[in-house]
Amino acid sequence: MDQKLTLPEIARRLGEPLHRVRYAVETYRIEPSERIGIMRVWGEAQVAAIQSALRRIAQGRGNYGR
């Protein structure tokens, strides 16, 4: 079963500040896998995409959402 995580949980797991994780999600338009009530949650595939986006941002690559 795919674990569902909120952005603060993803930030903790990746060892990144929450604001960087939010920035990656917004910049690369990474959609949550679902909503539980008003909470957005991301699955393992999206966590991998967020981690990849953070790496690209750290390396200074553009291509934001393109």
Image: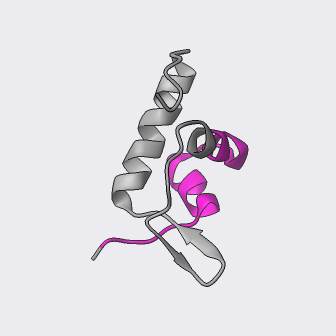
Q: Residue at x 40, y 44 (%)?
A: 49
- Camera-side residue: 49 or 65? 65
Q: Is 47 left or right of 29, judged from the image as shown?
A: left
Q: Main secondary structure of the magenta part?
A: helix
Q: Residue furthest bottom?
A: 37
Task: Verify whether residue 22 appears in magenta.
Answer: yes
Q: Residue at x 42, y 35 (%)?
A: 52
Task: Identify the magenta region.
Answer: 2-23
Report the label total: 0
Vertical side of 46 occupied by 23: above or below = above
Q: In terms of image quadrants, where is residue 4?
A: bottom left
Vertical side of 59 occupied by 23: above or below = below
Coordinates of residue 57 in the picture (x, y in percent): 55, 25
Vertical side of 42 occupied by 50: above or below = above
Coordinates of residue 41 in the picture (x, y in percent): 52, 68
Q: Residue furthest left?
A: 1
Q: Is 44 left or right of 55, judged from the image as shown?
A: left
In this picture the colour scheme is one colour
Coordinates of residue 65 in the picture (x, y in percent): 50, 32
Vertical side of 38 occupied by 42: above or below = above
Q: Is 34 left or right of 26, judged from the image as shown?
A: left
Q: In terms of image quadrants, where is residue 24?
A: top right
Coordinates of residue 45 in the picture (x, y in percent): 34, 54
Q: In terms of image quadrants, where is residue 1?
A: bottom left
Q: Residue at x 46, y 27 (%)?
A: 66
- Camera-side residue: 54 or 30? 30
